[in-house]
Amino acid sequence: MNTQLPTTQEVLKRKVAYKVRIGQINEAKQNLENERLRNIEVNGKEVVRVNLIANVVDKFLQEGEKKFASLTLDDASGQIKIKLFGDDVAKIEPFNQGDTLLVIGLIRVWNNELYITPEILKKKDPSFLLVRKLEVEAEAPKTLDRGQIAELKDKILTMVKATEPEGGIDIDKIIMELKEPPATINNEIKKLLEDGLCYEPRPGKLRYLG
């Protein structure tokens, strides 16, 4: 009979990899134990492993005796790095700036900086960024008061006006960049269309009418 106890790494890998956005990681409460990060709290859950989708905005490779590599990830809610050491640096060699990645890994902290030690890295279609935002927002619904709704409407209108020289803005981009629930954003866009402040030159594209 095998009575060998599981290693710490094996225990951690059994933890659920919660679907999150980077902003949630950066804003989460950090729970420490003997100055080591035990977990972070996201929506009342104690999170050790994360599952996120983000774009690579920077890549760093250090060769030589002390091999080190990192990718800086951005999903429009914030930025975080994945870090690898030694022979593990080979895991990020196929990926470059501009790629959209699915990342599953462990949350770590060093010098007050949160980062991820990746277990799984996969290239994904950029459309998955919006899919992930919709998934996460669905798990954390919230309502806005009248003042917040008015502020959201102003933000949407400002974004539409700013992109008028480029021929307008995609609704998906508005949803990605604003932190409010997609359903609420879509509702305010519908009101702007009904009020004649904006129009759709084609489905999914907004332009300012004024």
Image: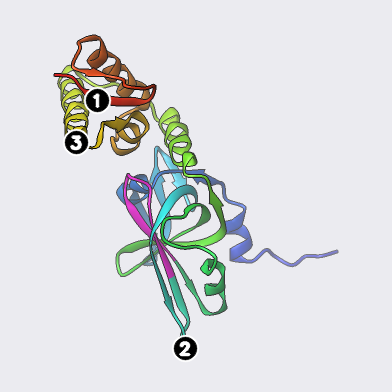
Label 3 sits on residue: 165
Does residue 15 lie above or below 202 as drawn? below
Q: Nearer the viewer, mark 3 or mark 2?
A: 3
Give the structural element (helix, strand or loop) at label 2.
loop
- Looking at the picture, how far across and down is residue 163, in whole percent? 21, 35
Question: Where does the magenta region start and end?
Answer: 70-82
**Quarter of the rendering occupied by the C terminus:** top left
Nearer-N-terminus badge (3/2): 2
Residue in the picture at 38% in, 47% down: 75
Q: Quadrant of residue 179?
A: top left
The residue at the point 61 percent across, 58 percent down is: 11
Q: Is residue 116 above or below residue 18?
A: below
Q: Secondary structure at mark 1?
A: strand
The residue lying toward the viewer, choosing from 171 and 54, is 171
Residue sitting at the far right: 1
Q: Earlier in the sequence, mark 1 or mark 2?
A: 2
